[in-house]
Amino acid sequence: MTTRRLFLQLSGAVGGSALLPTGSGAAVPGPREVSAAVPPFQAEMPVPPVLRPARSTHGTDHYELVAKPGTAAVLPGLSTPVLGYQGSFIGPTIKATRRRRVAVTYRNGLTEETAVHLHGGHVAADQDGHPMDAVQPGEKRIYLYPNEQRGATLWYHDHAHHIDAEHVYRGLAGFYLLEDPVERMLPLPKGKYDIPVMIRNARFDTDGKMIFEWRDFFGRDTIIVNGKPQPHLRVEARKYRFRFLNAANLGVFKLSLSTGDSFVQIGSDGGLLPRPYVTPAFQLLPGERVEAVIDFSKYPRGTRVIVKNEYAFTPETADIMAFDVGDPAPDRSAVPDVLRPLPALGPADRTRQFVLGPDAEGMPVINGKSFDMDRVDTTIPLGSTEIWEITNNDVAQPIPIPHNMHVHLVQFRVLSRNGAPPDGGEAGLKDTVTVFPGETVRIQATFADYRGRYLYHCHFLDHAAEGMMAQLEVV
Ligand code: C2O
Ligand code: CU
Ligand code: CU
């Protein structure tokens, strides 16, 4: 299908019209490099290792993290230069517990400045990895995370000024799983049946090097899951909880199962939904997380269940990964009808408008202005509750472009999408929300606990680094 049709479909997908099946049309622009030669489901899906604390003191776990160059075996027989935490293509997972602090001693072993941001974290402004707080090469600093918020699938990634898009692309991202004692009492699948799944894409040259070009939406044609191309995972015939994250800078995914069966979505960016949401497919745009339970017990041994991407624009990228079902296993887990009540939605103090779209030069900006570290765009009194009306007016230039809005510091609620209430999968706490071309989404957040400057931006990180980013200051 043509790029124009893809985007018309992407933009229409939420506006009501159905997405056409993928793989039905002609090739799209963007040279194919080695990825076409890699057959899917060859690699075993790794689960990123859990980082052990360097030490634990009363109430605090201390970790050590270093950003440095490394190499990774991503494609068969090739070695890929990466930038990673501990030099690894996907950072180690940090497991935190609610109300137990985490201190991360972070060392910059790169040749460029960096900052680490805990995406979705409710942290003080000077701990948020703001690009004005960059850590210079060879230097180190400590980040403090109080973990007072609800349990959630968070992630950490680079946030250096302007070069964060390329840094994240080259590997500077990892999971930060905040566990909540309240949640632990629910009978959801746990332990080795609770698996984080980081989905992204990249473009490789024939030597296995990753090619980074701005806004290379169609060129990043290799799907990578937990560091491997379209891998498979052997599962027991029982229930699993998966924490899906879209860590791509530009990739748009809508996940469904080749069996036609539904996911039971239990969580979103900010943790558990109030109640499970049964859906045959869910959208996952950059920065977003969806937690879902899949029950493999109904499939005979040897069944391959493929996770499809309904937003794929080539047949080669239509498969994300596969589950290979093995023997039945005892399973006492269950998805309760009630997961976790949401905090009350109080009255709002004011409403603001934000427009995502191109400036006169066609660069991606917010409210007509490109990011300026020295400018505060939005001043918010501490403790106030605001409704933000976010419109994507990127409807015209060569093709309509989807965007999303990520706000640091807060977990917000989606009030409406084009005037209609959000579906059950978007009814929980969110920190990143997709806005398709022509859409208006209303969100509500309370800016509590911390004063200072925080970012909000499109999480298509190439767009953010090009200017679609702004600053709020809680005063
Ligand atoms: Cu994933 Cu500014 O964030
Ligand atoms: Cu963030
Ligand atoms: Cu964008």
Image (spheres, rainbow, N blue to C red):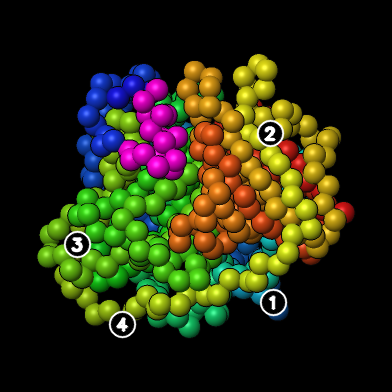
Q: Nearer the viewer, mark 1 or mark 2?
A: 2
* Pointer 4 or 3: first along the chain: 3
Q: Quadrant of residue 466?
A: top right
Q: Amino acid at mark 1?
A: Gly
Say whether residue 380 is left or right of residue 444: right
Q: Quadrant of the C terminus?
A: bottom right
Q: Which residue is mark 1?
A: 59
The foreground one among 266 and 147 is 266
**Residue in view at x 28 percent, y 35 percent:** 20
In the picture of the structure, the residue carrying the numbered disc 4 is 332
Lower position in the chain sequence, tag 3 or tag 2 = 3
- Residue 439, given in percent of the width and then of the height, sits at 54, 39
Measured Cα–Cα span from mark 3 to mark 2: 46 Å
Magenta region's main secondary structure? helix
Tag 3: amino acid: Val
Residue 70 in sight from this viewpoint? no
